[in-house]
Image (cartoon, rainbow, N blue to C red):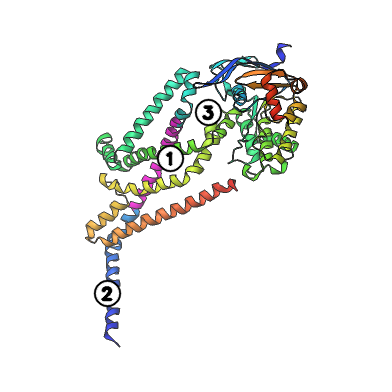
Amino acid sequence: MNDKNIIIKVKGLKKSFGDIHVLKGIDIEINKGDVVVVVGPSGSGKSTFLRTLNLLEQPTNGSIFFEGTDITDPNVNINIHRQKMGMVFQQFNLFPHMTVLKNMTLAPMKLLGKTKEQAEQRAMELLAKVGLAERANAYPSQLSGGQKQRVAIVRALCMDPEVMLFDEPTSALDPEMVGEVLDVMKELANDGMTMVVVTHEMGFAKEVANRVVFIDEGIIMEEASPKEFFDNPKNERLKTFLSKVLI
Amino acid sequence: MASWFENLINSIKLMFSDLAKEFQLNFIEGERWRWLLDGLKNTLIITFFSVLIGIVIGVVIAIVRSTYDKNYVDMKKRSGFGAGLLAFFNSICNVYLTIIRGTPVVVQLMIMYFVIFASSTNGTMVAIIAFGINSGAYVAEIFRGGIMSIDQGQFEAGRSLGLNYIQTMIHIIIPQMFKVVLPTLCNEFIVLLKETSIAGYVGIADLTKAGDLIRGRTFSAFMPLIAVAIIYLVVVMLFTWLVGKLERRLRKSER
């Protein structure tokens, strides 16, 4: 694999909270255009892993290279790199005091030097794409859960990121709203976006991912293509896990 | 006509003419109502500017203290120097809070006027500084509580977009914090407005002092003191009404 294609490279990543060792040495390389789905039992460290990728959690040990720069280096300005790593949270985290449009234009105007018109034009394009153009002036509290998460996704896309990180994006949604969010994510994957997705949606993993990663007890226990991963799991823990989630 | 009725009418007439005389004596004669007006002006000037100083001090201290509370452990790992600086500022803030909240405001005012600014003749300015510094300590804790009450996810969402710490604070955390703290903040301003009534201790002719000066001149206590009380009451009610309107406007986004 050509080194230029590697967008994120994680080496010996460890994270402890006090005496609790959540990540015990993770190594992975993520290439441009990859859709990596991370699964694992709750408490396995998969969310912590995702949150260390943009340094929302400070790693205890190891390094993370993003586009060739070690972002764990204290001298690196992490804000520059975070602009290129969009993140979507389980709890949406829209800004409740701003309209949908304002949510989406704040960062591009402050950080990319876009004018209000430029930022709003891009925001409206993206809103139209996810079918929410007519809600541009609504406040987050006036939206359904599924709508909120779609706005959260396009808010991150407004920064034109290189990678999108999804932290259990459908776990806080009512079941009937999961589909609309997954559809947006599928479309994004089809457009060639590099994505790292922590989720419990095995259907999404099978259908959209090109790599599935199983994290348990703070390490990567197995990594494979979706077909191999689900049809022919090798790790005993993964077999147990799959038998519980695939009923 | 029954004489008891005439007596009643007469005594009411007498009472009103007494009141009218009192009113004439305390407020009209020598244009003493102007004293109250000037006093009110001084009270409002002192309150307004100390509120401004209090908010500025409060925001700065609240940011330092909540940053320390939330980020010190992480910062220590990432950069020792920044963490040390933060710890240093945090301890300065703590000393300030302890001293200001631990001593009576009237003592602070007198120390300011007779010791620190002994050479200054501008009493109003000294009072503004003293009340501003005093109010800042209370406002800081109100703001810190507000900042800590905002969901951590809001902070993470801002940072994940690439906004730096200060930008996240200014555009995302502080606007939400203001909505949370508005009722408590309003309360603090009402307390401050009334607290300025001790400005007379250092010879400033505020509203309370004005009423007292009239009493000293006319030897009549009822009228000037009641007038002063009513003026305070009206100002506080007006302010409460305004804040209520503001609160309803800010709550619009929740519906």
Q: Which residue is disc 1 drawn over?
A: B142
Q: Is residue B174 left or right of residue B118?
A: right
Residue A162 visible, this orientation: no
Badge 1 or badge 2: first in the primary sequence: 2
Provide the residue span drawn in magenta: B38-65
As shown in the figure, which amino acid type bears the numbered disc 3? Tyr
Residue that lies at the very extreme toward the bottom in this rendered image? B1
Q: Nearer the viewer, mark 3 or mark 2?
A: 3
Secondary structure beneath dot 2 equals: helix
Label 1 lies in what chain?
B
Residue B179 location in percent, x, y? 51, 43
Tell me the element at label 1: helix
B116 lies above or below A221: below
Q: Please say if A59 is above or below B207.
A: above
Q: Which residue is more in the foreground, A240 or A35?
A: A240
| Residue sitting farthest toward the top | A2
Q: Quadrant of residue A105?
A: top right
Q: What is the three-letter code of the residue carrying label 1?
A: Ile
